[in-house]
Amino acid sequence: MAWKSSFRENICTLEQLKEYISLTPTEEKHLQKVIQLHPMSVTKYYLSLIDAKDKNDPIKKMIIPSVEELDLEGSYDTSGESENTKFTGLQHKYSQTALVLSTNQCAAYCRFCFRKRLVGCTNDEVLHQFSNACEYIRKNKQINNVLISGGDPLILPTKVLEGFLEMLSGISHLRFIRFGSRTPVAFPDRILLDDGLTNILKKHSKKQRRIYIVTHFNHPNEITDKSIDCIDKLIRSNVIVNNQTVLLGGVNDDPYLLAELLNKLVSIGVNPYYVFQCRPVKRVKHHFQISLYRGYRIVENAKKMLNGHSKRFKYIMSHRTGKIEIVGVMDNENKDTEMYFKYHQAKNPKNIGKFFKMKLNKSAGWLDDLK
Ligand code: SF4
């Protein structure tokens, strides 16, 4: 398979990286420490999107390890994934959705990943047998959709993915299937060079049981001729493509840039689904998370440049207790600033739709930082 040989050429060592990006000896020493804990892997395609002359290049910030990853503030499980794990590799947090961790591999390892604890590292949290997940879904009839995640499931062999879809096809109460994947962004050739993959997607994405790919574009520079062709191929394979973006400091924390990204996504057939507040993940929070106050302003200012279609997304904090929409800020004269929230989805169903406010500390980046 052509995509596999291209994948084998990923840049995984500092020696290889130095052919493309210059590193000082001190940087090299620190980065070696970083990648021993959280491996580096970059496709040559994604690397080619970096402007080597720009030391603040946003693609570089997302994919090349940095010494800032030595900062340990935060947690490796910010959304309570361990509490929601029913058995290894299967999480059930929201009544209608089962989440499967199908692999710990990705096309490329994003430095901001909230599952940093496992990507490219341990296999301990990955599902052993997909049939066990199917058995669980079959027994729990309230589950109407499954999110196959990881890692990135689209990096699995096509035969394996076909097996997943065949097994799921026997569960009648399942109404749709989602794959969470950044492959269209970081490695579009995986999809462009393998008609077998799009053929199975086409076969299984049916009139009343669609396949969704939730992809993850964060910056307009990721929308290239190749990624546009990749999205087009997916759409022509009966797949619906949604996008989630994470607000990342130094990458897309600018209303003009965010608006450009969301407008471009709509133009290529990708529906903006969520804009996420960056989670307080260890080795991520320090240099990627921006404050809720700033995040809200950026999102609202971006919305002023968007049409209705491009601003269907919600600005969300994926918290241990649920998906919390950040809906407003009240700057009160001579009084505390307040932020308004609403549970879009909740672990405790009683909280779904609950609207609440908190006193806002303007540097806070997460609900737990507020009183
Ligand atoms: S592709 Fe997704 S799971 Fe993989 S490292 Fe990037 S953000 Fe994490």
Image (spheres, rainbow, N blue to C red):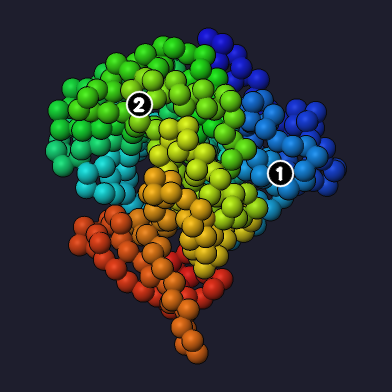
Residue at image mark 2: 239
Q: Nearer the viewer, residue 254 or 247?
A: 254
Q: Nearer the viewer, residue 148 or 190?
A: 190
Look at the picture and state if 340 lies above or below 146. below
Q: Which residue is at the far bottom?
A: 334
Separation of residues labelled 1 and 2 (CA atoms): 32 Å
> Residue drawn 44% across and 20% down?
233
- Local secondary structure at mark 1: loop
- Hey, what amino acid is under mark 1? Asp
* 24 displayed left or right of 50: right
Q: Is 260 situated above or below 342?
A: above
Nearer to us in this view, 151 or 76: 151
Residue 325, image x, y percentages = 37, 59
Q: Residue drawn at (23%, 28%), measured in percent from left and top?
A: 209
Kindly indicate whether the residue at mark 2 contacts the one at mark 1 (C-beta within 8 angstroms). no
> How far across and how far down the image is residue 198, in percent?
40, 17
Camera-nearest residue between 226 and 133:
226
Q: Quadrant of the C terminus?
A: bottom left
Residue matched to label 1: 57
Left or right: 349 as drawn, with respect to 250 = left
Please tell me whether mark 2 sits on a helix, a strand or a loop.
Answer: loop
Q: Upstream in the sequence, badge 1 or badge 2? A: 1
Question: On residue 371, which mark appears?
Answer: none
The answer to whether residue 38 is left or right of residue 95 is: right
Tag count in the figure? 2
The kind of residue tagged 2 is Val
- In this view, which residue lies farthest toward the top? 1
Residue depicted at 57% across the width and 55% down the height: 255
- Residue 11 in picture, x, y percent from top left: 68, 28
The reply to whether residue 282 is visible in this rendering is no
Q: Is residue 240 left or right of residue 220?
A: left
Q: Position of residue 59 (x, y in %)?
A: 65, 40
